Image: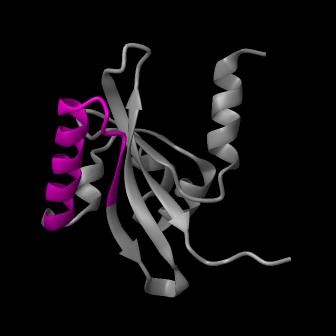
Amino acid sequence: MNLDQYFKGIIDSDEKAIVICDLNHIIVYMNPAAVKNYEKRGGAALVGKSVLDCHNSRSQDIIKNNVSKMREDKSVNKIFEFHKTRNGANEDVYCVAIRDEKGELIGYYEKFEDKNLYTE
């Protein structure tokens, strides 16, 4: 089994939506949670389309600004975007860099971190 299969397995098993974009803001991959979460907007059919088309102008500016910061500074790899509380959510949302082995920015994704405490 190659390493790519492990990485895909990690992404696909995440319960939160992961939408991976290239530097032109084109969606290159959506994990199963993202396909389900964005089903009303097109689900898997969003792959190959601009993620900017899924956001209002304010959010588009935030995304573009974050990608510019990560492109300019290799030490910037995770930027807080906002806290989401609608529909029962209690999440912080981050823009996360995807870098190649040389540290060059090749893409990004939004990361949702649940702030609800889990108890057993």
Residue at (62% x, 42% y) in the render: 11
**Residue 82 screen position, x and y as percent:** 33, 69
Q: Does 2 sit left or right of 51 as displayed?
A: right
In terms of secondary structure, what is the magenta stretch mainly? helix
Residue at (43% x, 84% y) in the render: 86
**Residue 101 screen position, x and y as percent:** 44, 15
Residue lying furthest front: 75
Relative to 80, does residue 85 appear above or below in the rendering? below
User: Where, quadrant-wise, is the C terminus in this rendering?
Assistant: bottom right
Relative to 33, does residue 25 appear above or below in the rendering? above
Q: Is residue 62 magenta?
A: yes
Q: Does 117 sit left or right of 65 as displayed?
A: right
Q: Which residues are magenta?
A: 58-80
Question: Front-most of 117 and 12?
Answer: 117
Residue at (62% x, 51% y) in the render: 32
Q: Does 102 sit left or right of 4 as displayed?
A: left
**Residue 98 screen position, x and y as percent:** 41, 32
Question: Front-most of 14 and 40?
Answer: 14
Q: Is residue 86 magenta?
A: no
Where is residue 68, by image quadrant? top left
**Residue 116 screen position, x and y as percent:** 61, 78
User: Where, quadrant-wise, is the N terminus in this rendering?
Assistant: top right
